[in-house]
Structure formats: C-alpha cells, structure tokens
Amino acid sequence: METVEPKMQHSMESLETIWTSIENRIDELEAIASSIIDLHWELVMQNEKPGWQNKSHLNLRIHRKGNNLRIDWTGVKWSSTANGKKYPLYTHITKGKGSHTYTLSKLFAFAREWEKPLIEETEKELAWIRREAFHLNRALFSIRYAKAAAMRSKEGE
C-alpha cells in the first residue's frame, strides 16, 4: 500500500528552499555584523590620540568561510625591533567554553579606559549574531543529513 505519491516522497525542492533561506539569513547576519564592526572602528578612530602608545590594544574582525561566520576579538601588544620600529603582536582571546560571548574581563585586560563602554556595547550587539549564526550552521548540517537520507531512500526503490 502506497501512502505518499512517489514524486512527493523524494522531492528535494523543499530542502533546497530551506537551505537557501538559511544561507540568505547568514548573509544578513554577516552584513549586520560588518556594519556594527565598521561603526565600532569609526568610534575607536575618533577617540584614539596620535602615537602608537595611544592606539587601541584590541582588534575586532569578521571572517566568513562558506557558511561559517566568525566574529573575533584579538589582543594587540606592541613590540619593537632593534632599530626601534614598532610592530603589533596579536594575541588570541578565547570565549567561554560553549559560549558565543567574550567575557568582558578578558576584553578589558587589553582595553584602554576610554574604550571600555564601547567594547561592552559592541560585544553585546555581536553576541546574539554569533549565537544565531552557530545555530543556523548546525541547521545546515541537519539538512545535509536529511538530503542524504532522502537520496538513500530514493536509491532503495
């Protein structure tokens, strides 16, 4: 006894539609995060005074590889060569275990006093984007497995 039309049983169209919708949302999150980061850097540049010793000791960046969206803070320490030329050394700052946010104490360890309120606000705005992007990425993995299961059932006919 057949309960589902054969065409409907193996249609990948709905899975493709869901996949595309999730990718579109990741694109939106990337654009939102980029604008938050750009605004953060504009405000940092407005408040920084001239000279390397007055520069921010935090770096904020966004990176996307495929559908994986990373928004990371890194610490910056300044060093100098034998001839006195300054250059930055970047330090990885870890998020809490299983967390999508940075603890403010870890960020503030690198922060100038004037930028602490800005860092706190920026991190608050970026945390929900990291969390949502993480769950959307997991959803794409689930859809990939659902497609594979549908293909296997189609082959079993």
Image: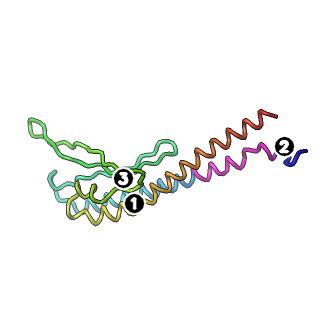
Mark 1 vs mark 3: in front: 3
Task: Please name whichever residue, 138 or 67, is drawn nearer the observer in this view of the structure.
Answer: 138
Q: Using the rendered view, name the quadrant where residue 12 is placed.
A: top right
Q: Which mark is residue 114?
A: none
* Structure colour scheme: rainbow
Q: Tell me which label, 3 or 2, sits earlier in the chain.
A: 2
Q: Is residue 52 above or below residue 157?
A: below
Q: CA distance from mark 3 to mark 2?
A: 48 Å
Q: Using the rendered view, name the quadrant where residue 42 is placed.
A: bottom left
Q: For mark 1, what is the residue?
A: 36
Name the secondary structure under disc 3: loop
Residue 138 sits inside the magenta stretch: no
Q: CA distance from mark 2 to mark 1?
A: 48 Å
Tell me the chief SS of the magenta region.
helix
Q: For mark 3, what is the residue?
A: 96
Which span of residues is magenta-colored?
A: 8-22
Mark 2 vs mark 1: in front: 2
Q: Callout 3: few (<14), some (14-19), or many (20+) C-alpha neighbours within 10 Å?
A: few
Q: Callout 2: few (<14), some (14-19), or many (20+) C-alpha neighbours within 10 Å?
A: few
Mark 3 vs mark 2: in front: 3
Q: Which mark is residue 6?
A: 2
Q: CA distance from mark 1 to mark 3?
A: 22 Å
Residue sitting at x 87%, y 48%: 3
Name the secondary structure under disc 1: helix
Q: Position of residue 122 (x, y in %)?
A: 35, 62
Q: Position of residue 142 (x, y in %)?
A: 61, 46
Q: Is 4 left or right of 72, judged from the image as shown?
A: right
Task: Please identify the residue farthest to the right as the structure is shown.
Answer: 1
Q: Callout 1: few (<14), some (14-19), or many (20+) C-alpha neighbours within 10 Å?
A: some
Q: Position of residue 1 (x, y in %)?
A: 91, 44
Question: Amino acid under label 1?
Answer: Ile
